[in-house]
Every structure is written in C-alpha cells, then in structure tokens.
Amino acid sequence: MAKDEEEDDVLPDKDAAKGFYAKYEPKEILGRGISSTVRRCIEKETGIEFAAKIIDLGAATEAGDTNPYHMLEATRQEISILRQVMGHPYIIDLQDVFESDAFVFLVFELCPKGELFDYLTSVVTLSEKKTRTIMRQIFEGVEYIHAKNIVHRDLKPENILLDENHNVKITDFGFARQLKGDEKLTDLCGTPGYLAPETLKCNMFEGSPGYSKEVDIWACGVIMFTLLVGCPPFWHRKQMVMLRNIMEGKYSFTSPEWADISEDPKDLIRKCLVVDPAKRITVKEVLKHPFFNQMLFEQNIDGLKRSLSTKSRRMSRINDIALRLSISWCCGNENLLLRKQSRFNARKKFQFAILVIRAMIRIRRLRYTAEPLRVEEAIRDPYRVKVLRKVIDGCAFRVYGHWVKKGEGQNRAALFENTPRTELHALYINNLSR
Ligand code: ADP
Ligand code: MG
C-alpha cells in the first residue's frame, strides 16, 4: 500500500484483484473521477511505471444507479474502445486489464506531465505556436478516433494528458461510443462548458435529430479558445445562461488578450464553434486549415530543401544556365577564374530566400508584438498591457485557479488594486494637468 495514502482512501480488497497486486505495486494517487481512482504503479518485474485506473463497480449504487452491472457494462465498453484506438501516438495506450467482482483495474502508460488542464493553469495562457503544436496533436488523435466511427464525447483539458516530452495523449474513453453507420446519439453526457449545442438541444426540444461526431470538433474549439486566452468561451456564473450561450453560439474575441492574437486561430475557432453541426468544419478540413499550414520557418522544410538542393534536377538546370551565362561573358585565360567567382550558388540563394520570407512574416506580424511599456497607460489600465496582464493573471491563477477568468471584458487587475480605480484615474488626470 502506498505510504502517502490518505486514511479514508482504502485500496481495493487484495483478494479481489490478486492478478493486479501480483504484477504491480500501487503508489500515490494521480487523479480521481466519480467512480475511479488513478494511481501511479510500478510493474514489479521490470520496474517500469504505469498508471492504474481502479474502477469501483459498487460506486454505481452509491451514485444512485441501483444496478452495478451497468457500471461493469460501461467499463467493458470503455475497454473495447480503448483497444480499438490505442497504438496512435496521441492516444493513451492500455497495457493491462484485471477484473474482479467489485473492481476493474485498467493499467495505462504513465503520462508524467499530467493533465493539459494543470499545465494551462501553471502557464495561464499558451502562445499561438504552442497552441498550434498541442491542437494539431489533439486533432490528429480525433481524426484517428473518428475514422473508426467512434465519438469521444468528453474532450476537455482534464482528459488530455501530456507525456514526458509534452506530447498529447487523449484519454478517458468512459463516454466514448462506437457508432453504427449514420447512427445519431441522444443521451446527455460530457462536461457542461464543452457540450455542443446539438447535444443540449436534443435533450431540451422534442424532435431534435440527435448528435454525432461533430460534438468532438465543438469541444476542440472550446479547448483551443481556452488555451489561447485562459478562459472558456461560454462561461457564465449562472449555468442556465452558459447553456443558452452555447445553444446560440454566443461568444466573442473582445477580451483584451485577443488583441495580441492573429487571425488564423480565430478563424479556426469560429469554424469549430458553428452551431449547426452540418456546417461545422470536419477534422480533415481542420488539419488543412492555414493555422496548421502557415509559416514556412516553423514547418519541417527538409523536403523543400531537398528538392531545391544543388543535386536536384531543377537546381542543376539553373546552375547550368548560370554557368553558361558566365562563360559567354568571359574570355581568354581569365575565364576559369571568373567562372568560378560568378558561379550561381543555389544553397546561398535558398538561404537568402528563407531570410527574406522570415523577415516579411515578421514585419507582417509586427502589429501583434508587444509595444514598449507606457507608464501612463500602465497606471490607467494595467490589464491592457500584455506584459502586466501576464503577471496579473499568473498571480490570480495561483490564488483562484481558472474560474477567476470569466472572459468578456473582465479585468483581473481589479483583484489586486489597493485603491479604487476611480482614484487612480483621478491621479492620472491630475498628473496630466500639472
Ligand atoms: P475519469 O473517467 O474518472 O475522469 P480519467 O481516465 O479521466 O478518469 O482519469 C482521471 C484523472 O487521473 C485524469 O484526469 C488524470 O489526472 C489522471 N490520469 C489518468 N490516466 C493517467 C495516466 N495515464 N497518467 C497520468 N495521470 C493519469
Ligand atoms: Mg476524466
């Protein structure tokens, strides 16, 4: 039994799961759900670390479901889906399964960097570049899941784990379903802030057509919005208002953070958060979106380099022409020397072209880079200044966590003001008039 285990957190009866305990040594708790506890564990024979999700089948009765068999059925469905989707680099690998009367043990590869949610809380917001890396991996995982006609239904930063290299691992297939053909689902499951409008509608209005895989794209849009600015798009302290906002697709890019963010990610979010699922972008289209295919210098350009290298046919042809030109311009014994000097260098030209492209992109993005700090502005409205906003957000998040950031015009600077804003403003006006 783990030494640091809390007293009320008793591990399952050893006799009930001999197989698991014979093979693994359970350690500290990594996370919890309604009916499961996830612990780090060590494979005794190899010393390799894993994560064991211990599902309490009895928890179903405690949670109001009178039939613990439902829980077992749901767990078996989770296992069956996990076995179909594992093997992809951005989806969690299931290593082992043990079943007893009261508990099921699912042994997964360990994700030492934990949840994307915790990572986001520690950094407050992610840069566009980091968001691109993370979102591309999530979408590639979703593409793989959807290709198998499976819908995840609970995508959120808590169910996206990070391995030791900060690569994504999609987990928690507890709500996932394999669809039969064009089957539509109607049951309400998922997490409120990430629910798609069609999921809500089919539980509120008679005759709604149900929902399908598009709900995962909606959830990805919500995740992407949250990664970029640290707050979810539809949040409202009254849950009914939040749900209405979701159904109407009511969100905006008006909070100060969005001023520093370029158009491509906004465009992709807009296309994911389309209320009508038939008009929503598909995962294949997402991966072709300019947000994932825009900047030459951030992409792997080895292929392009190879095709333009001096050995390639195109470049040797250009070299050939350059060589002939230099010959025609030169004469006598100086020919050879001059020819060498004026010889066209494809590599140099290519490097120069890359430099020019980089410079052009930087100039284009200048309007998104931070301006020098202006004291008057910092006093008047510190939250509008990007560097100060980062500091303010960092402090606020350490104290209050993500809920503090409510989006829409909210000013977290107010949490740290010693004097009312009106007095600060008056001070500023007085200074100006002096
Ligand atoms: P639930 O269905 O109860 O939400 P999850 O599978 O989402 O169960 O696991 C709950 C939490 O346990 C996760 O959010 C995460 O914090 C932690 N966890 C789960 N699997 C792993 C893993 N493989 N490595 C590290 N932590 C994990
Ligand atoms: Mg979970």
Image: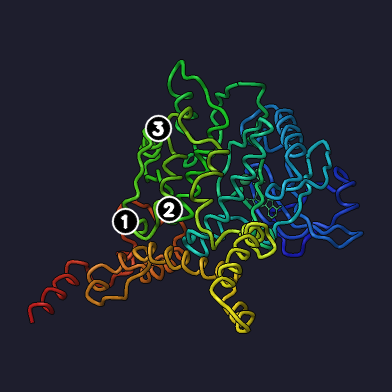
Residue 247: give its label. Answer: 3
Please say if the residues under marks 3 and 2 sit with CB atoms less than 8 Å apart. Answer: no
The residue that mark 2 highlights is 231
Helix, strand or loop for disc 2 = loop
Q: Is residue 357 visible?
A: yes
Residue 410: give its label. Answer: 1
**Residue 330 appears in which quarter of the rendering?**
bottom right
Residue displayed at 42% across by 56% down: 229
Q: Earlier in the sequence, mark 3 or mark 1?
A: 3
Q: Is residue 6 visible?
A: no
How crowded is the residue under tag 3: few (<14 C-alpha within 10 Å), some, or many (20+)? some
Nearer to us in this view, 317 or 227:
317
Nearer to us in this view, 281 or 289:
289
Give the x, y percent position of residue 41: 79, 57
Q: Amino acid at mark 1?
A: Gln
Q: Amino acid at mark 3?
A: Met
Give the x, y percent position of residue 262: 40, 56
- The verdict on label 2 being within 8 Å of ligand 1 is no
Residue displayed at 73% across by 54% down: 39
How crowded is the residue under tag 1: few (<14 C-alpha within 10 Å), some, or many (20+)? few
Helix, strand or loop for disc 1 = loop
Residue displayed at 71% across by 50% down: 89
**Residue 179 appears in which quarter of the rendering?**
top right
Residue 399: give its label. Answer: none
Q: Is residue 305 toward the left or the right of residue 355 in the image?
A: right
Query: Considering the image in quadrants, where does the N terminus appear?
Result: bottom right
Q: Earlier in the sequence, mark 1 or mark 2?
A: 2
Nearer to us in this view, 246 or 295:
295
Ligand 2 picture quarter: top right
Q: Amino acid at mark 2?
A: Cys
Q: CA distance from mark 1 to mark 2?
A: 11 Å
